[in-house]
Amino acid sequence: GAGVSQSPSNKVTEKGKDVELRCDPISGHTALYWYRQSLGQGLEFLIYFQGNSAPDKSGLPSDRFSAERTGGSVSTLTIQRTQQEDSAVYLCASSQARGSGNSPLHFGNGTRLTVT
Amino acid sequence: KNQVEQSPQSLIILEGKNCTLQCNYTVSPFSNLRWYKQDTGRGPVSLTIMTFSENTKSNGRYTATLDADTKQSSLHITASQLSDSASYICVVDDSWGKLQFGAGTQVVVTP
């Protein structure tokens, strides 16, 4: 496909369970971001991958959150022992490079996570 | 404190009318300022990107302005259509490539 693809689009899980969210970026985009969006709030940065460099994990809210990017393409965001406050929309975006001036972010449609 | 503040939080306008959304930021130094449109249940889509040296940029009926001295930007929607109903997000890119997001302005266009 031409755009960023995220799966699943919706996920309902019980408190304490682990979840995995997947992101397929646009082919050729070296930069990949994960954001969290809560109702009425701005996007909250979670983690950033750029090529083969070490990821910027400065936005991860706790050690229950982790992400990896395999082969410089597909990324998975894992949340362990989910809590109700983890409920949000998780957005993935890709771009040609971070801070590359006029390179826009291309977002997926997000995964809506509900922790019951 | 959020470094990107948007106003109003929400607004309702009649189809065919114009409206202007505001964005004030404190991010400094900054590389560029972006406006995104986010339809309900979808990811944000880029409308405009302006560097600090640009004052205005248009994308169809959307026109963004930037005053880097006062750290203010606006997004003007001309002749609004029902499809303009969405959240509009102002994003400031600092010089190190970190993006600061505003909370968005929710626009509702009514027939």
Image: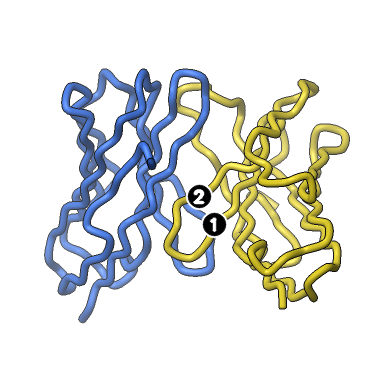
Chain colours: A yellow, B blue
Q: For mark 1, what is the residue? A: A37
In the rendering, at what x and y percent does residue A108 appear? 62, 54
Question: Residue A71: which quarter of the image?
Answer: top right
Is residue B55 left or right of A45 when viewed as pictured?
Answer: left
Question: Residue A22: which quarter of the image?
Answer: bottom right
Which one is nearer the viewer's eye here, A58 or B91?
A58
In the rendering, at what x and y percent does residue B59 appear? 30, 44
Q: Amino acid at mark 1?
A: Gln
At horizontal 36% and vertical 54% (from top left) the residue drawn is B104
Where A15 falls versus A5 (above or below)?
Answer: below
At horizontal 72% and vertical 78% (from top left) the residue drawn is A116
| Res A43 label | 2
Where A45 falls versus A13 (above or below)?
Answer: above
Where A52 falls versus A38 (above or below)?
Answer: above
In the rendering, at what x and y percent does residue B54 appear? 25, 23
Q: Amino acid at mark 2?
A: Leu
At horizontal 85% and vertical 68% (from top left) the residue drawn is A17
Where B83 falls versus A20 (above or below)?
Answer: below
At horizontal 48% and vertical 65% (from top left) the residue drawn is A39
Is residue B14 left or right of A8 when viewed as pictured?
Answer: left
Query: What is the chain letter for disc 1?
Result: A
Look at the numbered discs 2 and 1 and tell me whether their residues touch, using CB distance below 8 Å: yes
Identify the secondary structure beneath mark 2.
loop
Question: Residue B24: which quarter of the image?
Answer: top left
